[in-house]
Amino acid sequence: MTNSTNAAGANQTGLQNLIPRPAYAAPAAGKFRLAPQAAIRVDPPSADLVALAGYLADRLRPATGYALAVVPADQAPAGGNILLATSGGDPALGEEGYELIVEPAAVRLWAAGPAGIFWGIQTFRQLLPPAIESLQSQAGPWEIPAGVVRDWPRFGWRGVMLDVARHFFGVEDVKRCIDLAAYYKLNRLHLHLTDDQGWRLVIESWPELARTGGATAVGGDPGGYYTQADYAELAAYAQSRFITLVPEIDVPGHTNAALAAYPELNCSGIAPEPYTGIEVGFSSLCISKEITYRFLDDVIGEVAALTPGPYLHIGGDEAKSTPPADYVQFIERLQSIVQARGKLMVGWEEISTASLLPSSIPQAWASDVSKKAVQQGCKVIVSPGNRTYLDMMYDENCPLGLHWAGYVEVRDAYDWAPADLVPDIPESAILGVEAPLWSETLHTIRDIEFMAFPRLAGIAEIGWSPAAGRSWDEYRLRLAQHGPRLSALGVNFYRSPQIDWI
Ligand code: TNX
């Protein structure tokens, strides 16, 4: 950011407290005050922009109590109003970039397309006082400091993963995760839908997967599953927040729930007991049986048809009960199935030992094996366990989480660079970052919030913001200012002792 300091005690304008830190921001003199009669002008009055204006109005109405009418730009003056415009947006800012100009007289938000407008709206929300996020009416004034933000993302993949298999989380919980992710400009929600302990999506051609496989969860807790209508609703909700849903069907390991539902998927022909522990690596689909591939084609076919986004994650991790040669053959055959269903295959880093299409995407989490995929022309998602795993305990007193990858305090999750992980994986081979939240120890949305926040905000910044000009020392000051925002959003966040919360 230019013309601004961010030292403790300096005059903190809203522009200096944005997370993710924008590519460019410059303060100007004066303030814009949102007034009761303000309107949201759209140019052009397309369905996309009218929907985005409605989304913005919905965010602002509860706290302000203002009507915030949505009107075509040519039917209301600029003065006192907020403009959302794709006509005249600068294509150089890219599909997700935007320009926000705040002047005392008006607010103008431009982008080449709707995604940029959506991310610009998140910036605008963060410039308003934290109380704007309250669902109860609050006293204003609703002022924001004047200035200019020109902003675009560093990486195209800015993800968060939720494990709904170890414990199940319903549609409303997932929608809340989507909304909170969007606030920090994340654009991928990876849903880990299947594992040893539960199968969470109805597959019409194999109904016992959800019926039997969905009944269990870790610790004997209640299971659950999404109907296909639930799943479609989540995908559409994510899309309305410019987040692409990435479904994961984890094979060939992590499959006890499927193997328990269908004995014929086992090499022995005998179904195992349902599993509610938290060990990994003991289950495998039967690589040598043809029915395994009919099963996969049916499952992948239904999931692909339900999924609007281009990606389908096939897991592939910790297949310790699948011999390595079988594993490679299996992944290569599965890659053809995913490709035939029109999707790009994503898999955990272990898939890198197979022969991959350059469009297949490994997700690095524990080793440097993904460099084998980079050598094949693939791009990688980085999710290092000791930095991005939101299920790692913050410290030894953390009431939730695991610690096999170490304790991950807020600084650990923020103070690293994707290109520094593996020398053979340069930034040009990195698609982006993702923070997985595994749910062995989590039961409620409050638990999810506690583990995700505030670490997820830091991961989001690594995904969005240029490296130049940001550092832990200044980030921790910005993050401190987000305490009241997270509180107003009702988020049960971890009050890390590394942050001087205001
Ligand atoms: C490793 S990361 C796993 C998951 C566990 C997680 C717990 C990865 C691809 N596999 O099965 O839930 O550790 O932190």
Image (cartoon, helix red, strand yellow):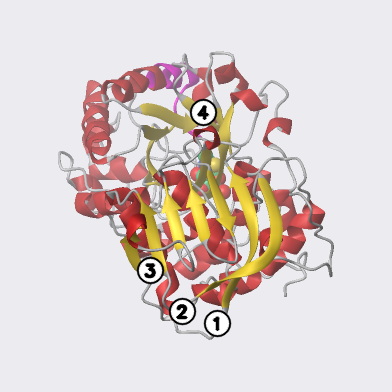
Distance between the alpha carbons at the discs numbered 3 and 4: 38 Å
Dot 2 lies on which element? helix
Position of 116 relative to 353 (above/below): below
The residue tagged 3 is: 58
Q: Looking at this view, is 386 or 318 the one in front? A: 386
Q: In the rendered view, does 470 fall on the left or right side of 405? A: right
Asked whether disc 1 touches disc 2, contact meaning CB atoms under 8 Å apart, the reply is yes
The residue tagged 1 is: 140
Distance between the alpha carbons at the discs numbered 1 and 3: 17 Å
Q: Whole-percent x and y of residue 491?
A: 53, 70
| Mark positioned earlier in the residue sequence (1 or 3) | 3
Distance between the alpha carbons at the discs numbered 1 and 4: 48 Å
Distance between the alpha carbons at the discs numbered 2 and 4: 45 Å
Q: Looking at this view, is 214 or 114 the one in front? A: 114
The residue tagged 4 is: 362
Q: Is residue 320 magenta?
A: yes
| Mark positioned earlier in the residue sequence (1 or 4) | 1
Q: Is residue 449 magenta?
A: no
Highlighted magenta segment, given as a residue range: 317-330
